[in-house]
Image (cartoon, rainbow, N blue to C red):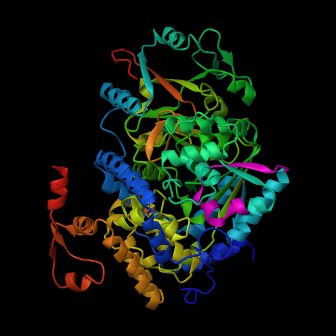
């Protein structure tokens, strides 16, 4: 018998007479705030700042200038399908890992975000690029549109396609391995800057 | 147990890290004499308990999430023989290759052969309980393949020629000064001016591993969840070493226990809330990666998934013990356990220490052991468990299946030791307060044996929230 058949036969025998009750789903599956709601954006900002990300609000009209200002001292890479860019940016056309390692920062969009946990989800879409591009450079500047921000984790997962390679990011790289204290910045980007685009503006810059 | 479930082999002895070489009471006695270890553990577990309590308190649907998690796990185990082939089919359809291993020896051989076929003699690894359980690093070393651990705590353990002592933080028994010394001694090219500031230590690890990430061709990982419906594998981590391993090499080999399967993508919404809050006490861990087979032009272009039994089906065959397989390895039960806090992880002689180890290890190995006695049955582990595994009842059940005489005496002695150490009274009072956790509406209706003889016939009033001594020291 193959290992596969053997294991499945063992499971089958072990499960004889076992029935499982239905799964209760009484937890919250939708939030109290609609995507992009002002209070939700405040919560999202709080959560990001709590985990040491920087949040820079802007409007569609001020986005380009805001990005240029953030990135003025850095060499920046952008994915080939990026909606935003900055002067002098390098477009990723299949750069080597060593080339990516030599750049200061990466600028991308995101697929969706979750306010309650301060999480940004990337799905390797055209404006986010392949995973290596958002991993190797030491700084990640991520543009999040207000309507991409949902309240809860279930709403976040519902917006994503699991067959795409996904990365959920909650603050910059961190470790709790030394005496169980959180220390920011290990192997992934040590700086995470979220540029939050709202129609009205009105949020404060926070770090 | 091994006689009862013929045809359900346990995890073999002589391979991997489940079979300790010393009984718990012996090993615990030595650990209790190590004051530095006790201080490190006490400090770390107190830190994490406080963080966990605060982020769990933020969610008003925490109990509903726990109930959903418990039921999802029971459902998964009852349908494992359907869900695993479904996972296999989905991974295969997306360009991955699935392998099955009856036990540690088979799993190690599969991985060694896969690495050999790539022609490399070095691999990078993401921290994984499954690969620690089967002793993969030793098997690779025997085949002339160097495995570089990339998780900071695993690196500390590996460089310190040490054994892991905690599921989540394998180097929890080390403080920052000890870590600095290990780095100075063992890390090639380390800055001799290195201080013991945690940030500086983390930066030393970053510099040490950077070149490896960018050049190593093969990575090995575990899996937190494998979604049957879509074939999506999930790794939950913090440092970005996981992302590096899962993204940059050409070949990725993932070793996953068969119990890690999750029915649907939607079900992940429960576990992605329960796990980070219970383990590191964060609303969400910094990085979670998911991938489904192979994505052209992005990440490893060869993906192998190795599904491992290694005694899990023997656990499944015991109706009173099978829920030990529900564990999502958050480590919350370790952090609240008064016995773990004093004895430390090494005393359990298994990669799975603490309360979950005391029930899972003997069931996986089927070997006679005093581990089910390594508990005071205070109930704190059940209250902390995000998937509501009733560890205290299972301990009592396992005690009844283990040979009684000498082991029992010795183990009770170990627990007595815990109670008799510096804070005998303090601890006793704390256990009483923990009794509140099993109290419902202010009454304790059922205590674990032997006290059940008392509670079977009457309710005990729940102990007060704060003891006099706690109040005194908190003034
Ligand atoms: S038994 Fe429960 S609390 Fe303990 S590690 Fe497993 S899931 Fe976490």
Q: Position of residue B336 (x, y in %)?
A: 36, 60
Indicate the quadrant of ligand 1 in the picture. Answer: bottom left
Residue B15's place in the image compared with B409, above or below, is above
Q: Quadrant of residue B445?
A: bottom left
Give the residues in magenta. Answer: B119-138
Q: Would residue B129 be counted in the magenta stretch?
A: yes
Residue drawn at (61%, 53%) of the image: B160
Q: Quadrant of residue A71?
A: top right
Q: Is residue B11 visible?
A: yes
Q: Position of residue B140 (x, y in %)?
A: 75, 59
Q: Position of residue B330 (x, y in %)?
A: 46, 56
Residue drawn at (62%, 58%) of the image: B87
Residue drawn at (45%, 74%) of the image: A19
Q: Is residue B464 left or right of residue B169?
A: left
Q: Nearer the viewer, residue A172 or A134?
A: A172
Residue B62's place in the image compared with B1, above or below, is above
Q: Nearer the viewer, residue A116 or A123?
A: A116
Q: Would residue A153 be counted in the magenta stretch?
A: no
Residue drawn at (72%, 36%) of the image: B211
Q: Is residue B18 left or right of residue B24?
A: right
Q: Is residue A164 visible?
A: no
Q: Nearer the viewer, residue B250 or B398?
A: B398
Q: Is residue B415 left or right of residue B140?
A: left
Q: Position of residue B332 (x, y in %)?
A: 41, 58
Q: Is residue B434 left or right of residue A155?
A: left
How many dots with numbers? 0
Q: Nearer the viewer, residue B320 or B162?
A: B162
């Amino acid at each position: 018998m193959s290992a596969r058949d053997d294991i499945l036969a063992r499971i089958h025998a072990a499960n004889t007479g076992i029935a499982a009750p239905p799964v209760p789903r009484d937890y919250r599956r939708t939030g109290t705030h609609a995507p992009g709601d002002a209070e939700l954006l405040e919560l999202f900002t709080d959560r990001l700042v709590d985990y040491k990300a920087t949040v820079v609000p802007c409007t569609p009209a001020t986005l380009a200038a805001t990005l240029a200002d953030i990135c003025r001292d850095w060499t920046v890479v952008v994915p080939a399908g990026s909606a935003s860019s900055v002067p002098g940016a390098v477009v990723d056309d299949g750069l080597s890992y060593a080339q990516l390692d030599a750049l200061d920062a990466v600028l991308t969009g995101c697929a969706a975000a979750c306010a309650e946990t301060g999480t940004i989800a990337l799905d390797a879409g055209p404006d986010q690029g392949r995973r290596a591009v958002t991993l190797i450079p030491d700084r990640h500047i991520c543009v999040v549109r207000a309507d991409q921000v949902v309240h809860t984790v279930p709403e976040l997962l519902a917006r994503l396609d699991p067959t795409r390679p996904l990365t959920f990011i909650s603050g910059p790289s961190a470790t709790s391995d030394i005496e169980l204290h959180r220390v920011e910045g290990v192997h992934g980007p040590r700086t995470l800057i979220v540029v939050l685009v709202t129609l009205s503006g009105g949020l404060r810059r926070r770090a | 147990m091994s006689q009862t479930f013929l045809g359900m082999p346990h995890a073999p002895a002589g391979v991997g890290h489940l079979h300790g070489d010393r009984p718990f009471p012996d090993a615990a006695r030595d650990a209790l004499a190590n004051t530095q270890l006790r201080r490190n553990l006490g400090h770390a577990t107190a830190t994490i308990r406080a963080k966990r309590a605060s982020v769990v308190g933020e969610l008003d649907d925490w109990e509903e999430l726990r109930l959903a998690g418990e039921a999802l796990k029971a459902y998964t185990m009852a349908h494992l023989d359907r869900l695993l082939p479904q996972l296999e089919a989905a991974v295969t359809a997306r360009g991955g290759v699935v392998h099955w291993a009856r036990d540690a020896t088979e799993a190690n051989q599969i991985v060694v052969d896969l690495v050999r076929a790539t022609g490399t003699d070095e691999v990078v690894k993401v921290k994984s309980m499954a690969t620690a359980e089967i002793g993969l690093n030793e098997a690779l070393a025997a085949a002339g393949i160097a495995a570089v651990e990339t998780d900071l705590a695993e690196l500390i353990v590996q460089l310190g020629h040490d054994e892991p002592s905690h599921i989540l933080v394998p180097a929890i028994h080390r403080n920052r000064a000890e870590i600095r010394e290990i780095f100075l001694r063992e890390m090639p090219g380390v800055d001799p001016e290195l201080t013991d500031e945690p940030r500086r230590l983390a930066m030393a690890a970053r510099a040490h591993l950077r070149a490896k990430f960018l050049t190593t061709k093969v990575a090995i990982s575990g899996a937190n969840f494998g979604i049957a419906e879509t074939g999506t594998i999930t790794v939950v981590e913090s440092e970005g070493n996981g992302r590096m391993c899962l993204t940059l090499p050409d070949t990725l080999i993932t070793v996953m226990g068969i119990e890690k399967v999750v029915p649907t993508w939607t079900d992940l919404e429960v576990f992605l809330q329960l796990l980070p809050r219970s383990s590191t006490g964060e609303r969400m861990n910094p990085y979670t990666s998911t991938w489904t087979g192979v994505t052209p032009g992005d990440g490893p272009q060869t993906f192998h998934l190795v599904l491992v039994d290694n005694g899990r089906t023997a656990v499944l065959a015991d109706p009173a013990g099978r829920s030990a397989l529900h564990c999502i390895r958050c480590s919350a039960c370790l952090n609240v356990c008064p016995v773990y806090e004093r004895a430390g992880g090494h005393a359990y002689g298994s990669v799975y220490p603490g309360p979950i180890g005391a029930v899972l290890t003997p069931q996986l190995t089927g070997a006679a052991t005093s581990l089910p006695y390594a508990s005071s049955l205070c109930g704190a582990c059940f209250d902390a468990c995000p998937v509501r595994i009733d560890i205290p009842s299972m301990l009592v059940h396992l005690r009844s299946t283990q040979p009684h005489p000498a082991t029992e005496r010795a183990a009770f002695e170990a627990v007595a030791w815990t109670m008799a150490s510096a804070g005998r009274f303090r601890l006793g009072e704390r256990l009483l307060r923990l009794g509140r956790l099993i109290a419902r509406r202010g009454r304790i209706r059922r205590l674990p044996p032997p006290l059940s003889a008392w509670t079977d016939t009457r309710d005990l009033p729940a102990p007060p929230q704060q003891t006099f001594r706690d109040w005194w020291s908190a003034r």
